Image (tube, rainbow, N blue to C red):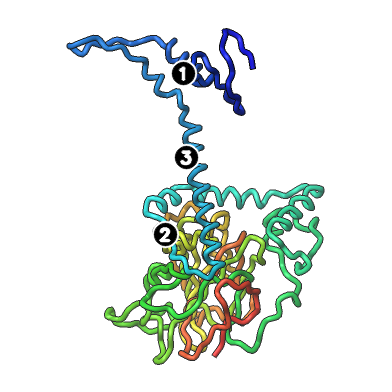
């Protein structure tokens, strides 16, 4: 192809023109423009004492803009992380066990620096905004399609009935939608996915397979003996042994993850008495299974509400763990509970005893009775004492619905 100036174009690429100006000299047009801009910059002179040096001004070093560089670096990192997830998924499909890759301290610190508490409070206020009547159906339909919500189970199927997102998230179910299993001693308190379950060993609880957290860090130090159903133990005993009140019993746990499309209320998993509540203000990091594999002691970092008491076999506890956009945790019989409140600081906790002079036992709960609700999906952790012959009827990763059996003797 002919070109002006006596030069000849020898190759053309998308967005790049290669010109031949001599038998052994090739030029890229963008490079020529870059070198030309450098040539036009005024020179600065300084004397080293030996000879005079000429340099371009410092602004020539910033021809590469920082924003594109950061975007390219961040995009590359995200792409690499997605590739790792895809590779691990394929290895799992082949039946190969993949060791968890935990986040470093600086990665956790960087994530915790994100103002998730403030963002969650803003999200909570947005959820309270009443939607125009004509906008309700398209907004809720998009959410239903995105997260696979089954509205045929809702007590009210008409989408126009829900004035705001908060009412839609907290929708009630039809009475027959979740029959409560009466044959087994412990049922699922909510809809969700089973992350892990089993015995608590060495005061460590499995968050997901291969990733643990400290039992004492999660539940916090023991409260006063009169507030709790179990007797005081000597300092030589481990924290686990302080919770096990009967000889021959073991301590068990079960973790249930609630996705955004799941039913958001949770119920009593058994017949028990709640004697104490402990609220831990904390971070509101995501608790999806991927994050649970990545961040060790994720549940100990996040805001949570720990209910402790006893059932027929001894100690029993249910913990509602908050997450991003799930700062609101509500316990129906506890009007003093205010989660994700700016008046509470991270690293602290506040206690409330339901055992009073007028009520020596606490708050009795029947199996399947309404207990509380989340503003969006999150996690429920059960830690309880039971005889050694207690058996879970579960598989890790399985979907479960409120009312279905977790295990029995």
Q: In whole angstroms, how far apart are the C-alphas of marks 2 and 1?
A: 54 Å
Q: Which mark is residue 102?
A: 2
Residue at horizontal 65 percent and vertical 87 percent from the top: 182
Residue at horizontal 42 percent and vertical 59 percent from the top: 102
- The x, y position of residue 274, in whole percent, is 52, 78
Q: Quadrant of residue 377?
A: bottom right
Residue at horizontal 60 percent and vertical 66 percent from the top: 258
> Which marked residue is nearer to the observer: mark 3 or mark 1?
1
- The x, y position of residue 36, in whole percent, is 47, 13
Q: Which mark is residue 24?
A: 1
Q: In whole angstroms, how far apart are the C-alphas of marks 2 and 3?
A: 21 Å
Can residue 122 be seen from the camera position used here?
yes
Which residue occupies the extreme left position in the image? 49
Q: Quadrant of the N terminus?
A: top right
Q: Which mark is residue 263?
A: none
Can residue 318 be seen from the camera position used here?
no
């Amino acid at each position: 192809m002919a070109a002006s100036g006596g030069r000849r174009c020898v190759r053309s690429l998308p967005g790049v023109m290669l010109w031949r100006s001599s038998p052994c000299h090739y030029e890229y047009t963008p490079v020529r423009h870059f070198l030309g801009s450098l040539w036009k910059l005024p020179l600065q002179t300084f004397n080293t004492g030996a000879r005079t040096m000429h340099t371009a001004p410092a602004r020539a070093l910033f021809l590469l803009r920082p924003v594109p560089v950061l975007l390219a670096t961040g995009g590359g990192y995200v792409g690499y992380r997605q590739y790792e997830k895809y590779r691990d998924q394929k290895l799992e499909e082949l039946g190969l066990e993949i060791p968890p890759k935990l986040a470093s301290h600086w990665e956790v610190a960087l994530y915790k620096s994100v103002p998730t508490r403030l963002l969650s409070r803003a999200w909570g206020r947005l959820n309270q905004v009443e939607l125009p009547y004509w906008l309700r159906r398209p907004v809720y339909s998009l959410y239903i399609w995105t997260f696979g919500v089954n509205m045929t189970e809702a007590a009210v199927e008409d989408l126009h009935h829900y004035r705001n997102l908060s009412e839609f998230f907290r929708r009630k179910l039809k009475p027959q939608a979740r029959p409560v299993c009466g044959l087994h001693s412990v049922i699922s308190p909510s809809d969700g996915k089973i992350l892990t379950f089993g015995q608590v060993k060495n005061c460590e609880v499995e968050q997901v397979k291969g990733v643990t957290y400290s039992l004492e860090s999660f539940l916090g130090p023991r409260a006063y003996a009169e507030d709790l159903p179990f007797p005081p133990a000597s300092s030589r005993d481990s924290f686990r042994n302080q919770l096990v009140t009967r000889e021959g019993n073991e301590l068990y746990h079960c973790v249930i993850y609630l996705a955004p499309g799941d039913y958001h209320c949770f119920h009593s998993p058994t017949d028990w008495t709640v004697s104490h509540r402990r609220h831990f203000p904390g971070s509101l990091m995501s608790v999806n299974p991927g994050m649970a594999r990545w961040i060790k002691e994720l549940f100990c970092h996040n805001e949570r509400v720990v209910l402790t008491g006893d059932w027929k076999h001894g100690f029993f506890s249910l913990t509602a763990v908050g997450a991003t956009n799930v700062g609101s945790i509500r316990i129906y019989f506890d009007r003093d509970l205010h989660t994700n409140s700016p008046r509470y600081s991270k690293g602290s906790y506040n206690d409330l005893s339901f055992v009073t002079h007028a009520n020596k036992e606490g708050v009795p709960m029947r199996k399947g009775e309404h207990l509380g609700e989340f503003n969006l999906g999150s996690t429920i952790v059960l830690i309880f004492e039971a005889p050694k012959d207690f058996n879970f009827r579960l598989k890790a990763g399985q979907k479960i619905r409120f009312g279905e059996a977790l295990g029995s003797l």
